Each structure stands twice: as structure tokens, then as C-alpha cells.
Image (spheres, helix red, strand yellow):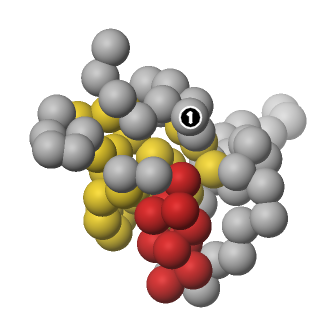
Amino acid sequence: MTESAPPYVFSPRIIVLGVQPGDPPFRIVEIDGEMVGVASSMTDVLLLAASAGIIVHDLDDKDVVQWVGGGKFTWKLH
């Protein structure tokens, strides 16, 4: 009988959720599975990450940031 380890599912530390209605529209940011704030620009995402001790060198790095409901340039409702 051979036992195997369960598959490892990788999740980036930073998840930026889809655009929410507001004035201005915003996106909820989660770090390590916890909601840490809202962002209305890429700069806000970087500031939230830095406040959690995470230095982001590339917002396109899927191992670091996951963009849900649009990429880093999506900040308005469609």
C-alpha cells in the first residue's frame, strides 16, 4: 500500500478582490486570508502590503498577488 501526500495548493499572500461600487469604486484586499483594507489604486495595494511587511516588486507576479475580477488596471465598474 502506498500513501501519498495530499496535493499542495498554493495561494498567493495578497488577494485583490473585484471592484465594488462606491465613490470612488474600490477593491477589497486580503493578506494571508484576512481582510486588511480597501484599495482604490495600485498604490493602495502596495501600501497595504508594505504595512503587512510584504515588499511587492512585481504586481504581475502571480505567486505574490492574485487579482480577482480584473487585473491591476481595473478600478472602475463595467
| Left or right relative to 14: residue 17 | left
| Most distant residue in the front direction | 23
Which residue: 33% across, 69% down?
A: 36
Which residue: 30% across, 65% down?
A: 37
Residue 58 is situated, as x and y percent measured from the top left of the image, at: 78, 55
| Most distant residue in the top direction | 78
Q: Quadrant of the C terminus?
A: top left
Q: Secondary structure at mark 1?
A: loop
Amino acid, disc 1: Phe
| Mark 1, residue position | 73
Q: Quadrant of the N terminus?
A: top right
Which residue: 51% across, 74% down?
A: 47
| Left or right relative to 66: residue 74 | left
Residue 45 is situated, as x and y percent measured from the top left of the image, at: 50, 61
- The residue closer to the viewer here, 41 or 65, is 41
Residue 68 is situated, as x and y percent measured from the top left of the image, at: 47, 32
- The residue closer to the viewer here, 14 or 43, is 43
Q: Is residue 61 above or below residue 31?
A: above
Asked if one can make out residue 32 in the rendered structure from this viewpoint, the answer is no
Please give the count of numbered marks on the rendered protein.
1
